[in-house]
Amino acid sequence: MGAPSFLKSSAALDSDLASREKLVALSAAGKLYALLDPFFESYAFEPSRKLELRDTDPQFYEMIAWDRVTYEPPRLVQVPLEGLSLLLDGLSTERWGVFVISRYSLEELAMHLQRFVIARGPDENPYFLRFHDASVLGVLLETWDASSRARFFGPIDAFGLPDLDSMEVKIVSSPVGVKSRKAVRPEACLLDLGRKQLEQCGRAIEGDLVKVIQWHLRGHHSRVVQHLSREQLEKRVEVAVMRARRYGFQSVSDLAGFAALMFELAPNFDEHPSFKRVLADRDTVPEMKLRRLSQTISENDWKEALQLFDREFWPRSLAFLAKRS
């Protein structure tokens, strides 16, 4: 399928794939940084700085109900050689963030990037911008106009976006070169998000999620998925993610764990009364439900769930998925 028309631009960005040797050289020269997801373990990375939320458009800052905000900003880190190996080895299993390539200091880059954490949405309201997610940043860099891209790159030479298809790092270079160190007013950093951009970002996030879980299953549950092609497995993972979200699961690890049970035990294992009781319990937070299953489900219940295996589940569910799309 070709790219949607709103993704096509006469000012396409230059990009190439970075070899491990190139990234090692950048790290050794002190020019390689990373924006890490706040839930990714960052103990191996120093120096580091968590982006703040205050250095943005003053008017929009006042509009936000901060007591209800759950958004966590990313952490900007300088990538040492040992940390680089950790990130590259986790390409297929972690959505850890993106690389940032720059000759400027950690402090200067943090001050620049934190001014873009809040953007203006299509409804004129503030949105927290997850530009540390490679799937989101890839869409934004392709769809922003030249002025917005220039402001966002600023002192950054290039971004390195992990590609979950090739397991490589795609380098997207600045279209304007490195700008001066002159500070930009926060209100000048308030970038606009269109409705189509948001929809495309949502689809990109879901696509990467399916790829991560697919790689997880290949790596840790190969016995039960080895007979499936990549396309077949990813379609089944889409079904598994939809089913898991009925029970409130949202994190990658929980969605992957639920999917693993569908493949290892039975795709309809959650119909067994004992499993259903735990999964549908509104008093148990979703993050604890899989652990509760391992602690409370008897060996006999596991066997009964296996015997409930519905051989028509996958054909029926995949047909439903095809109709939706």
Image (tube, rainbow, N blue to C red):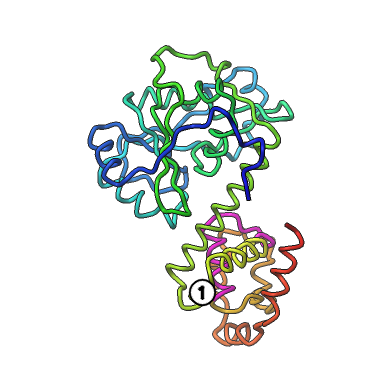
Q: Which quadrant holds residue 111?
A: top left
**284 or 271: which is nearer to us?**
271
Report the amino acid beneath label 1.
Val
Around disc 1, counting alpha carbons within 10 Å, would you say few (fewer than 14), some (14 to 19), or many (20 or more)?
some
Q: Position of residue 217 (x, y in %)?
A: 49, 68
Q: Does the magenta-highlighted stretch encompass residue 249?
A: yes
- Majority SS type along the magenta span: helix
**36 or 215: which is nearer to us?**
215
Residue where numbered disc 1 is placed: 225
Tell me the residue at 50%/57% (across/down). Answer: 212
Q: Is residue 48 above or below residue 155?
A: below
Tell me the residue at 61%/23% (across/down). Answer: 61
Q: Which quadrant of the figure contains the C terminus? A: bottom right
Q: Is residue 40 left or right of residue 231?
A: left
Q: Is residue 269 left or right of residue 130?
A: right
Magenta stretch in the rendered image: 245-263
Q: Is residue 262 above or below residue 180?
A: below
Q: Which quadrant holds residue 238?
A: bottom right
Q: Does the magenta-highlighted stretch encompass residue 194?
A: no
Tell me the residue at 63%/45% (across/down). Answer: 202
Q: Position of residue 132 (x, y in %)?
A: 49, 39
Q: Is residue 295 above or below residue 64?
A: below
Q: Is residue 113 left or right of residue 275?
A: left
Q: Which quadrant holds residue 69?
A: top right
**248 or 153: which is nearer to us?**
153
Does dot 1 land on a helix, a strand or a loop? helix
Q: Position of residue 287 (x, y in %)?
A: 56, 58
